[in-house]
Image (cartoon, rainbow, N blue to C red):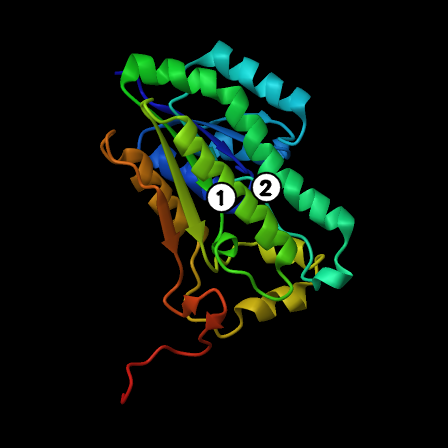
Amino acid sequence: MTTRRAVVTGASSGIGEATVRGLRAAGWDVVGVARRAGRLEALDAEVGSASFAADLTSETDVEALAAHLADTGPVHALVHVAGGARGADRIEDGSPEDWRWMFEVNVLSAQLVTAALLPLLRDAAASDGHADTLFVTSTAAQTAYAGGAGYNAAKAGESMLVHALRLELGGEPIRVSEVAPGMVHTPEFTLNRLGGDVSAAEKVYEDVADPLTAADVADVIVYALSAPGHVNLDLVTLRPVAQSAQHQLARGALRPRGH
């Protein structure tokens, strides 16, 4: 069998970048996709990935990505990490522009990329046994929280896309997996969400014992794609031990009771 090739979106930072690194270390060919070409090129030079700069909310860009992939080799896996959050406002104070942006980058991009790449995934499954789609959503898709409604709605929408896709691909050898992380400490996510307010972003993680890292999430993604072809990880929810639930976070050192 040929070396398996994965397309990883959101590859210029955070979980997407870590996934490119993890898959390359596991022997995959990887095409990293994001808008920031300079960051992708630097990653390519470091780990030997390929890259394609694209805005995944643009139908034109997604069509160009699909054409490029068709010309350059098989696609055995789509790992859709691209997404994001903007704002932490109450519903009554929410910005329509922020909500629209969150729907486009989390839901519309997932639909556009999936539709464009499915023919390539089917070709790879026919020749090599199976193919994969894997979507990184969030525990925000599972539990609402005050100030999170826009992101809750967008990630829940993406999660429903995943569930529907699995049903629609029933009978085909294409796995559909969802990885839903809780608190992950990445350099950009919270900073971007809070409008670049460094102090506010740092307070989110203050005194939290070992939040998840991007590499932690990438490890799960690599495992899911490396599992035997008949094994589908429908949904993996992962959180740091300090985060018992979406709304319950322990700050300070973790200690056994009575010690």
Residue 168: name its quadrant. top left
Q: Is residue 62 left or right of residue 172?
A: right
Q: Report the residue marked by disc 2.
A: 106
Q: Residue at x 52, y 56 (%)?
A: 140
Residue 203 to residue 100: above or below: below
* Spot occupied by residue 54 in the image (x, y as percentages of width and height): 63, 27
Circle 2 SS class: helix
Q: Amino acid at mark 1?
A: Ser
Residue 203 to residue 129: above or below: below
**Of 88 and 259, which appears nearest the observer?**
88
- The C terminus is located in which quarter? bottom left
Residue 77: tell me if it is visible. Answer: yes
Q: Report the residue marked by disc 1.
A: 159
Residue 139 to residue 210: above or below: above
Disc sitting over residue 186 in the figure: none
Question: How many numbered circles are shown?
Answer: 2
Q: Is residue 50 left or right of residue 35?
A: left
* Spot occupied by residue 234 in the image (x, y as percentages of width and height): 35, 41
Q: Amino acid at mark 2?
A: Asn
Disc with the residue nearer the chain's start (2 vs 1): 2
Q: Is residue 164 left or right of residue 173?
A: right
**Of 210 and 98, which appears nearest the observer?**
98
* Spot occupied by residue 123 in the image (x, y as percentages of width and height): 39, 13
Q: Is residue 183 left or right of residue 61?
A: left
Q: Residue at x 57, y 20 (%)?
A: 65
| CA distance separating discs 2 and 1 | 10 Å
Is label 2 or label 1 in front? 1
* Spot occupied by residue 232 in the image (x, y as percentages of width and height): 29, 36
Q: Residue at x 30, y 12 (%)?
A: 127
